Image (cartoon, rainbow, N blue to C red):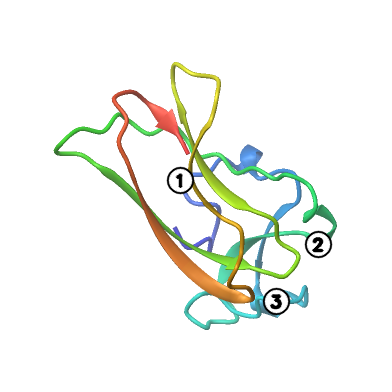
Amino acid sequence: CDFESDLCKALHELNLQHGWIRRNGQSGMGPPYSDHNGNDSAYFLSLSSEMQSFPATLRTNVFLPTDEEHLCQITFHYWVSQMSGTLMVGLQKHSEDTITNIWQDSGELQNQWRANTITINSTEKYKV
């Protein structure tokens, strides 16, 4: 998913809420001024500046259960600015209302792109 034409198949348009916007480095909104590859015209998701002190959530569509043959790995690139709080990735199983935190970054290394890969094991359908 690169956000070049839309929000990709993993994210619902309706789930782009609470200040999330699709933009690129040429938008005039401040850093980052390019994507993780240095391309200033490539799109990424960003929190609008007025929403950075409020919780904001993105939810995927439902993924099918994993097993020994079918693992799910999600690799994502993210930018942590000086005003950022904590970026968390959670797992919500189909049978549960709660979201289990499976990864987080509090932004010790700021103003740079970082990458992370998460491997998910779930015996039932889930959202991230």
Instruction: Please tell me which residue lies in front, 11 or 95.
Output: 95
So how many labels did they put on this image?
Answer: 3
Q: Is residue 67 above or below residue 25?
A: above
Residue type of the residue flagged with mark 3: Pro
Q: Position of residue 69 (x, y in %)?
A: 14, 39
Residue bearing the label numbered 2: 49
Q: Quadrant of the N terminus?
A: bottom left
Q: Is residue 115 above or below residue 14?
A: below
Q: Residue at x 78, y 47 (%)?
A: 54
Q: Position of residue 118 (x, y in %)?
A: 37, 50
Residue type of the residue flagged with mark 2: Ser
Q: Which mark lies nearer to you, 3 or 1?
A: 3
Residue 124 quadrant = top left
CA gap, disc 1 and disc 2? 26 Å
Q: Is residue 107 left or right of residue 90?
A: right
Residue bearing the label numbered 3: 31
- Quick one: SS at disc 3? loop
Q: Which mark is residue 9?
A: 1
Instruction: Please tell me which residue lies in front, 104 or 49.
Output: 104
